[in-house]
Image: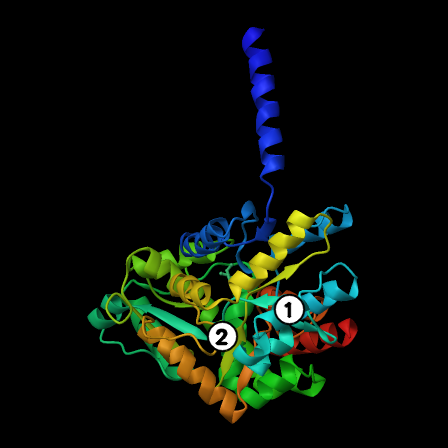
Amino acid sequence: MKSYVLGAVSGLAIVASTAASAGPEAEVLHYWTSGGEAKSVAVLQEEFASNGGTWTDMPVAGGGGDAAMTALRARVLSGNAPTAVQLKGPAIQEWYEEGVLADITAVAEANNWADVLPASIAGHMKCEDTWCAAPVNVHRVDWIWANADVLNANGIAMPTTWDEFNAAAEKLQAAGIIPLAHGGQAWQDATVFEAVALGILGADGFRKAFVDLDIDTLKSDEMVAVFDQMRTMRGFVDDNFSGRDWNLATAMVMNGEAAFQIMGDWAKGEFLAAGKAPGEDFLCASTPGEGFLYNVDSFAMFDVDGDDKKAGQELLAKLVVGQNFQKVFNLNKGSIPARTDVSLDEFDSCALLSADDMQASSDSGSLLPSYAHGMAMRGAQAGAITDVVTAHFNSDMSSQEAVEMLANAVANSL
Ligand code: BGC
């Protein structure tokens, strides 16, 4: 009894002292839970804390963020939005239209975001004429990762066409190696699909299909060829692919069980977190074809009450676009900085390739938003496309049936 009373008293004392030392605070909803991702978000937690902030972590596991977005909707509907949320692409503007986002224009202007961010990235962070999100990076989606020893031992070079990829995969399969490490989750199917689509449709065709949602392109012969290639690739994954998390697929490439993975460069974060070196242990190359599919992670702040939370939002927004954070976070995350004025001296060869290709594709008009990672279109349309991609990958549906279903699904979602 006595100890209970003492416990209660000391509990009160803690509450009182917390209230007295209040400062910037943020409850942050994110889905960075794999090894490489957790190391990356720790950089932000540390920087936030060393600037006097109190961070309440709300991680929601699930690659690609589908589960996190479901959790977010539940929180907002119950009138209890988190202070800051890992949110990106047109979903930012969708939440803005629901009237639940905080305006961070003052932070953006005080820190000259308009001068240090490329216009293509800044555009995603704006809601009408206000700033409503803060970008942390540029992930590239159209990457192929490989185990260097496995390729060497089998006399295989990184493929530069889909035919080369198929030939390499057949050779590996004959040698008893799983050609393609894949996790059968809808967003991972979509990730592979959009890389194949970029390669086969080309940048203009990709834009027509996944930015303009042009129905003729969605049911074109070229799109039939995209589904044909998906069917071929279905034959290159192992029997246990269903439901597998993306980072476990990356681990299969790391340990030599599989040769390739097609995944955004958050996979590089996993290789690095496991102590693997690019060019030695693992290889990176863009998937066959021209263009660059970008995926910019960002944070949006939700409308919350309380000066401490508002101060937390301001501090967080300022830090994530800060030069130091953009460097250290992205060294861990596998991406490159969103800011144009961060030195890439400490970045590896895959990051340098990404930065060069991003510039070149921006110059040539083939820098494109990733549909699979929520950058190209609104949720309803992206969901309609992914449903077809997954249904095709997991059945014996013909490519012709798939394109018809795709065109109908998109037409109905418009
Ligand atoms: C996000 C990355 C994340 C990956 C896996 C992507 O959509 O942009 O930050 O690492 O999903 O969850």
Tag 1: amino acid = Val
User: Hey, which quadrant is residue 356 in on the image?
Assistant: bottom left
Q: Is residue 408 left or right of residue 165?
A: right
Which residue in the structure is indicated by mark 1? 388
Q: Which residue is at 55% across, 60% downward?
A: 64
Q: Name the quadrant of the C terminus.
A: bottom right
Which residue in the structure is indicated by mark 2? 339
Task: Please indicate, yes or no, whether residue 82 appears anywhere in the rendered image.
Answer: no
User: Hey, which quadrant is residue 150 in on the image?
Assistant: bottom left
Q: Is mark 2 within 8 Å of ligand 1?
A: no
Circle 2 SS class? loop
User: Hey, which quadrant is residue 408 in on the image?
Assistant: bottom right
Q: Nearer the viewer, residue 38 or 69?
A: 38
Question: Residue furthest toward the bottom?
Answer: 364
In the rendered image, residue 399, in percent from the top left (x then y), is placed at: 59, 77
Residue 411 sits above or below residue 147 on the image? below
* Numbered badge on residue 238: none
Circle 1 SS class? helix
Task: Please indicate, yes or no, whether residue 50 appears anywhere in the rendered image.
Answer: yes
In the rendered image, residue 38, in percent from the top left (x then y), is placed at: 44, 52
Decide which of tag 2 and tag 1 comes sooner along the chain.
2
